[in-house]
Image (cartoon, helix red, strand yellow):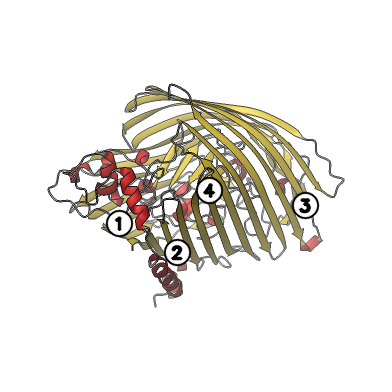
Amino acid sequence: MVSKRHGTTLRHFPVMATAALFALFVMALPSGANGQKAAKAALGISPSPTISDTLTLDSLVADSLTLDSLALDSLSFDSLALDSLGLDSLALDSLAQDTLPPPDPWIILPPDTTAPKAPTPLSITVDGAEFARHGYKDAGEMATLLPLLYPHQTQLYSQPFYPLPPGMSGRGLTVMYRGRSYDNPVTDATNFATYAAEEIQQLHLSNSWDGSGSGSSGPVLTIDPPHAYPTTALTRVVYRQGFYGLGHADWRIAQQITEDFAYHIGVDIGEYGGRFGNSEANTSMVRIGGRQQIRYVGLLQLYWMETRETHGHPYGYGSSNNRRNDLDIILSGGRPSDPEYREAALWYVRNQNGYNYGDEDGNRIGGRLEWWRDLPDSTKKISLRADVERTAARFVRRPRNQDPSGQRLVSGLTGRYRWDEDLLHTLAAVRMEFGTRSGIPDTISIDPAFLAGGTVTGELGDSLGFGLLGEATRSWRWPSMDESFGFWSLRTPDRWMDLLPAPDQATLYYYGNPVLDPEVSHYAAVGARYNQKAGRSLRVLAGYRSVANPIIMRNLGGNEYTRRNGPGQSAFELTGFGWLDLFYGISTAASWTVSNANDTNPYPNTWGWTSLRFDGKYYHNQLRIRLSITGNYYGSYDSNYGSSEDALILNGLATMKINKFELYYGAQNLLKTQYVLFDNYPFMHRSDIWGVRWIMWN
């Protein structure tokens, strides 16, 4: 057995063996031949089509495209999305060959051939083609490939991971999932350790509220889960192993069994041995979902996820046991690409945190009605959304026998207008919200609030070449349950992760403030972009953000803190993001953020990464070699623990893919540079991560 420091243990083999046995059982089920025949008939595909038979797009999708040509690239077959494919990803060079490899034995039914659309013309979208070029370990690392999101983490796998926007806490970022907020009901912040990396098909980043859900005082990150179901059952196995006992295994199966019914099941297990005292962690995630077409009613979709994580408090005391459940029920009429489309949705989220010093129990229940309609000339679309959501939390703190609780009820109405012409792409949205809050004891009286705002975004230019960008937004966020009613000790492990600035280590107690006002944010930006071809572009955006009534820390004296509304804050933000081809399979990509918002906060004003890549395909795309070298830069900053110098971290990644089997090896911090992502937790070692991805069908 290899030593624990290098991470390989035998504890994962029972898990993988169990997953393999279950996969064999599921793959032994009928594969839905009737569904395959109907799919082929619907797509107009002969039993054994070839390129010489027809050159229709349907036949290309069904037979000529391999997984390498899909938008999600090598991570998942679920990115079977025509809208996200470019001419380069169709592997046209392989069509000129006399002999092609056998076609894949699955067919994708509409509407799965339509990729989810970005919320606004200015949204940045990344998918597996980008994820696969970084040796990521979890969903948080995937999210922070995007600009504006600082990786506020301790470099401890399965520990809490909160991306922070410039000058804001983790509550300033709103994460959208299946049309509603994914944030923790207690904190209104998203801990990405609770989300499985393999359940991400695409990520869309909007610099401000984008009209897709409830208000936000900062950026909005939208998660698109895998949405396609093949007619033949496909199983994906992903295994990663790395430094300090890091282990991660994920198994997922999905199938369109009949024309009316589809399902997917996923299991994820992660384990981390720890590199600091009391920093061991492990996670387990289960995802089950599916859809059923009901005649005369619509398409009924049901999705359930459960996450359990256990982690210690590095350099401190206590441990945390967190459990989260998400249930989404969606009934839709029509398809998203139809001239008229409707959705009704219900969701329930419960997040339970258990600490040595107390417990938290938060839940969120809500519903929405949405309606989209194309206007007669088909270049304009309007939509309406009505939603209501109740958020509640209860806090138990044993050291002082405290037991506060509270709830928030918010209803909202959104109207959107989207116009897509040849040169002009715009989105205008307005939203109104009415909210009430109450707490226990009953003597707490909080006035209701009415808020209104909106956004206008636009892009002007040809689909290829240069274009101009612009955006103006007014939005807000409500105080979270723990900001209003919470009572906790600093020694609870993840409490200091999403706060900004983090309280001093000597702080023992924090009290909520029930009379906080909502934060109100104004954002304006202008920029330019250059589109080289489909999937290759460069975008630069300069923005100005001001926040009224920001919710900040306030010292009560001694080692006790609370929250209050502080004076207005404002900052400039400059972001850049792009991926451009150079020559002979070599390309370059980058993501950068520069802001003056962090002068008083413990993380840098400037951070980002630049990458040089090589991508080569051989033997009719059956062999693929990819190499990349990435430089991550983190600027200097001051904190309670002194000054942290700027650092350049070099990472390397090599992957080899033969048909549907991929082997990869990555090395992080090749030069063993000392750097700090989270205050007082230095990282100075080279770390390795290696693993496999394997896609199989019965």
Identify the mark nearer the N-term, 3 or 4: 4
**Mark 1 to mark 2: distance in Å?**
18 Å
Which of the numbered marks, if any, corresponds to residue 405?
3
| Three-letter amino acid code at the position of disc 1 | Thr
Q: Which residue is mark 1?
A: 655
| Three-letter amino acid code at the position of disc 3 | Ser
Q: Are marks 3 and 2 in contact (CB under 8 Å)?
A: no
| Three-letter amino acid code at the position of disc 4 | Leu
Q: Position of residue 223 (x, y in %)?
A: 49, 45
Quarter in which the C terminus is drawn:
bottom left
Identify the mark nearer the N-term, 2 or 4: 2
Q: Position of residue 541 (x, y in %)?
A: 45, 30
Identify the mark nearer the N-term, 1 or 3: 3
Task: Answer with left or right where residue 543 lies relative to residue 449.
Answer: left
> SS of the residue at dot 4?
strand
Q: Are marks 2 and 4 in contact (CB under 8 Å)?
A: no
Q: Residues within 10 Å of mark 4 (few under 14, many from 20)?
A: some
> SS of the residue at dot 2?
strand
Task: Answer with left or right where residue 535 lies relative to residue 620.
Answer: right
Q: Residues within 10 Å of mark 2 (few under 14, many from 20)?
A: many
> SS of the residue at dot 3?
strand
Q: Which residue is mark 2?
A: 248
Q: Which residue is mark 4?
A: 300
**Mark 3 to mark 4: distance in Å?**
35 Å
Identify the mark nearer the N-term, 3 or 2: 2
**Residue 186 visible within the image:** no
